[in-house]
Amino acid sequence: MGGVSGLVYSSVPVVVFVLANAFFGLKVGIWSAVGSAVAITVLRVVRKEPLQPAISGFFGVAIAAFIANQTGSAKGFFLFGIWTSLIYGGVFAVSILLRWPLVGVVWSALNGHGQAWRQDKRSRAAYDLATLTFVLVFAARFIVQKWLYDEDLTGWLAFARLAMGYPLFAIALAVTVWAVRRAQARQNDLESAAEAEETDDAAVEAALRRKYGETG
């Protein structure tokens, strides 16, 4: 996601759009938001920061600006994010039902830990809880922001976009860290137990070989 700087950068086009729209109108707001997204993308490239978050952020702003232009309304700028929250929440929810909680899948894939944790109920339960937290975050964003959108409360919609970004993400991140640590500790215990069992089996086999070897 681009780290802390990615979170900060993602809020800049929103603030720029709201201010420019309030003082100079929708067209200026749209182009100002796109311009700030381009500037941020260039800045991240120059600073050799991760490129993927910069590109995805730019396209997100571009799509939001396109929708605002097509609808002719400032609140249209937030429509893409609203429905994206619903889609993300649905995907995370389905992953729990399929017993492939996305938090565990993504974390394990990024760190090369494999998916062996899925065979352990306690590890999977920890990742289920972390994934469920993201479901609740996305659901809250969709419900609140969709209501503000329907009520034409554009100013409050922008505020909710920012206010429900960092604080809720911080909560989900805290639960994710807890789940990862719990699952990793559980996997370490299981691996230690398996190694101890293999050692015991090897010792028994060696003793039997000595016994019957001496007898023979």
Image (cartoon, rainbow, N blue to C red):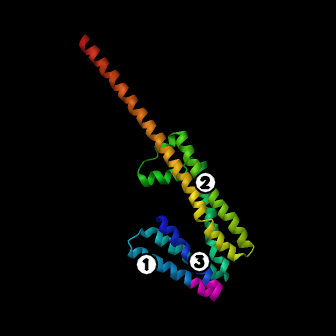
Q: Residue beneath label 3, please? A: 15
Mark 3 is on which residue type?
Val
Name the magenta segment's main secondary structure. Answer: helix
Please report the residue visible at 63 percent of the width from the left and 61 percent of the height from the top. 138
Please report the residue visible at 70 percent of the width from the left and 65 percent of the height from the top. 144
What segment is highlighted magenta in the picture? 20-31
Mark 1 is on which residue type?
Val
Examine the rendered structure and indicate whether residue 162 appears above or below residue 118.
Answer: below
Viewer-proximal residue among 66 and 23: 23
Q: Residue lying furthest bottom in this view?
A: 24
Examine the rendered structure and indicate whether residue 32 appears above or below residue 151.
Answer: below
Query: Helix, strand or loop at disc 3?
Result: helix
Picture quadrant of residue 160 = bottom right
Q: Residue beneath label 2, please? A: 133
Examine the rendered structure and indicate whether residue 120 appears above or below residue 89.
Answer: above
Viewer-proximal residue among 70 and 17: 17
Mark 2 is on which residue type?
Thr
Q: Which sits earlier in the primary sequence, circle 1 or circle 2? A: 1
Query: Helix, strand or loop at disc 2?
Result: helix
Select label 3 or label 2 by which is in front.
Answer: 3
How far apart are the alpha carbons under marks 3 and 1? 19 Å
Q: Residue beneath label 1, please? A: 42
